[in-house]
Image (spheres, rainbow, N blue to C red):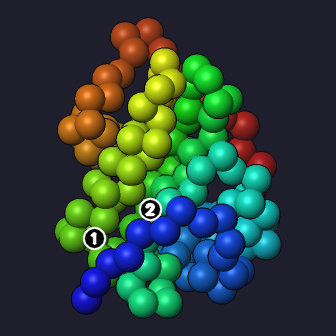
């Protein structure tokens, strides 16, 4: 198996839905919104096993000062192959000239993963959300 990485924003609803369902994310119920979201994102890097979408990282940025890595997901069948690490590495490299790269892990177990890249938690900062799904 050879994993190919692409910087593309073009996905089918089926590709997106399958990947998001593989990690049990609630947003998988809205593949049409996810397809549009990818097109409107600043940067999307994806991982492919032939024509199968197996991983994806998406970032939003202002082009000058800050980028937010919104999510990183890898199909569980492909976890352990360092795909997530490669996706984040590519995003960090793409944003090497920005002042800040931020991430807000939604699961505590993800914190150690991001710390490998040099991310650090703020002492007095907590992410907040309004959930509408």
Residue named by callout 2: 73
| Quadrant location of the C terminus in the rendered image | bottom right
Residue 4 position, x and y percent, is 38, 76
Residue 111 position, x and y percent, is 31, 38
Report the number of discs.
2
Residue 115 position, x and y percent, is 25, 34
Determine the image quadrant of residue 119.
top left
* Residue in the picture at 49% in, 68% down: 6
**Left or right: where 92 falls relative to 46:** left
Q: What crowding class fits label 2: few (fewer than 14 Cα within 10 Å), some (14-19), or many (20 or more)?
A: many
Q: Is residue 119 above or below residue 78?
A: above
| Residue 72 appears in view | yes
Image mark for residue 79:
1
Q: Is residue 122 above or below residue 71?
A: above
Residue at the extreme front: 97
Say which element carries label 2: strand
| Residue 30 appears in view | no
| Quadrant location of the N terminus in the rendered image | bottom left
Distance (Cα) linking label 1 and label 2? 9 Å
Q: What crowding class fits label 1: few (fewer than 14 Cα within 10 Å), some (14-19), or many (20 or more)?
A: few
* Residue in the picture at 57% in, 57% down: 44
- Determine contact: label 1, label 2, CB under 8 Å: no
């Amino acid at each position: 198996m050879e994993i190919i990485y692409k910087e593309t924003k073009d996905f089918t609803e089926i590709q997106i839905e399958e990947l998001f369902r593989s990690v049990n994310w609630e947003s998988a119920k809205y593949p049409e919104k996810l397809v549009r979201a990818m097109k409107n994102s600043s940067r999307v890097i994806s991982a492919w096993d032939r024509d199968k979408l197996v991983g994806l990282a998406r970032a939003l940025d202002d082009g000058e000062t800050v980028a937010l890595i919104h999510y990183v997901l890898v199909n569980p069948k492909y976890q352990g192959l360092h795909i997530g690490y490669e996706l984040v590495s590519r995003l960090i490299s793409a944003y090497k000239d920005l002042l800040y790269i931020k991430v807000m892990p939604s699961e505590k177990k993800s914190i150690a993963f991001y710390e490998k890249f040099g991310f650090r938690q703020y002492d007095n900062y907590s992410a907040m959300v309004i959930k509408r799904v």
